[in-house]
Image (cartoon, grey):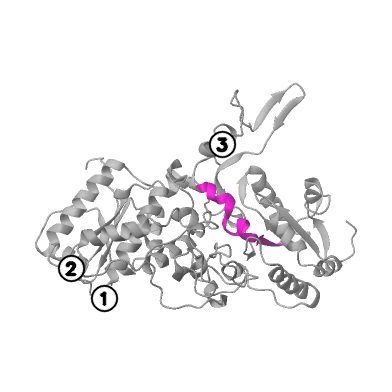
Amino acid sequence: MSDQFEPVIVGFLCNWCSYRAADLAGTARIKYAPNLRILRVMCSGRVDPQFVLQALLNGADGVLIAGCHPGECHYVNGNIKTLRRFTLLRKTLEQWGIEPERVQLLWASASEGTVLAAAVDRMTEQIRDLGPLRWSQKVLNGNGAAHPVAEEA
Amino acid sequence: MTENGKPKLAMYWASSCGGCEISVLNIHEHILKVDEVFDIAFFPCIADFKVKDVESYPDGYIDVCLFNGAIRNSENEEMAHLLRKKSKVLVAFGSCAYEGSIPALSNLTTKPATLDTVYFDNPSIDNPDRVLPQISSQVPEGNLTLPEFYNTVKSLDQVVDVDYYLPGCPPEPEQIWAVLQVVVGALTEGQPLPPAGAVVGAGTTALCDECTREKREKTIERFYRPYEIQPDPDQCLLEQGIVCLGIATRSGCGALCPSVGMGCRGCYGPPEGVYDQGAKMLSAIASVLDVGDESMEEAELESLIQDAVATIADPSGTFYRFSMAHSILRRVKNGKGAA
């Protein structure tokens, strides 16, 4: 066991493309970073920005949203909505001091197991360089937590 | 206060502007009824009370306490604990006590940056000795103390238990009167109170429900700041590209701002069932952006969307204008958020 920092990345993968890309990466025995915790959603357009914020609050160091390439969405344009939402979310998170590498959007079709694996490897390295987020402990530090409120420095 | 059997009413301001007190007085002649039914036990805005008066009351002495203002410093927090102990029913009154409101916008920056702006880096400030207020300072007459200024602004329920929330910046007088009538009914005729933790004096649906503007399919290509556009008097403001938080805001005010051509600011907080008003607004407003479609190349699509999103000048400050303390992440990580 090494004591290097292992980031926790929460992944919202769409049922029709990216989750299958992860499946393919598995069946093809592609080796990639084990840091991604995958949650399957029916469409990347299902990912409410609240999900991303909740993940960051509850200990995730990064969040990956993955869906079909534009033009290939099972629901025609769910992923276009994702892209619009993600673009605005990224701008907001930037104001909050959250590095853009921590929340990423990826297009990975069902045949792109290697693309997904490479993206997870890359994202894991980027977040490892940034260090842990640990929002509740490091940023809130008891501030704004449910009462009783911890002493503030 | 004499013991005359009347229920006791208190109202206190923590980090607030005083508008909530004015909105209570703005219930017009009903205020006479309030005075008839209640004994005022503590109300620094309108009558002379001291903290030691409150301290001398037995626990639970105050029947209803309307607490407005956010928790900005240690004095606010101390008063929240004191009034919680002395009150049977504690109401987070107004947007600041409910969800942080304008004071909590400073959660988009840090305490050092805020102090720097207020005491040093400001055209109207001359502070060559770089004097900052201290929690405790020794002077010949003795030790002087000031409350501690917190890094993070909190809502009332992040400090003490809250029985009811009455949203609005400020709450609308008729809504206040409606809530006071319920309380009076409960105290005098034993009528039931709303369930604990409820948002009172407001609706449950989105503000659009009570907005009379004409709503059609939303296809927005870019957003305009209020000075950039003369809005059509009848059409939905959002459809015209004016950021209006009505779609992510609780009804209850009668859509006052949209009715005069100003997009909803969001002061009634999130509708029933939504926790993070800003995130929901972000989600909704991005979905109705009508630029780019699935036939485009990825790069072209990204750049079109990027340009459209760039027309929203300050998403955090706009979507979280009233709800920063109650948002999921509650504050920014470092000072970069100061827009």
Viewer-nearest residue: B124 or B36: B124
Which residue is located at x 40 percent, y 46 percent? A97
Which of the two discs, 2 and 1, labels the residue nearer the N terminus? 2
Badge 3, how many Cα within 10 Å: few under 14, some, many 20+?
some
Identify the secondary structure beneath mark 1: loop
Query: Residue B299 vs residue A137: left or right?
Result: left
Viewer-nearest residue: B200 or A137: B200
Residue B295 is situated, as x and y percent measured from the top left of the image, at 21, 70
* B169 in relation to B254, above or below: above
Q: Do marks 3 and 1 share a chain?
A: no
State the separation of the CA atoms marked 3 and 1: 50 Å
Q: Residue furthest left?
A: A28
- Residue that numbered label 3 is attached to: B115
Viewer-nearest residue: B217 or A61: B217
Q: Which residues are magenta?
A: B89-107
The picture quadrant where one finds residue B96 is bottom right
Which residue is located at x 58 percent, y 65 percent? B268
Which residue type carries mark 2?
Arg
* B309 in relation to B259, above or below: above
Query: Residue B1 vs residue B301: left or right?
Result: right
| Callout in the foreground (3, 2) | 3
- Residue that numbered label 2 is attached to: A20
* B38 in relation to B215, above or below: above
Badge 1, how many Cα within 10 Å: few under 14, some, many 20+?
few
Q: Do marks 2 and 1 share a chain?
A: yes
Query: Residue B303 vs residue B288: left or right?
Result: left
Which residue type carries mark 3?
Leu
Residue B269 lies in magenta, yes or no?
A: no
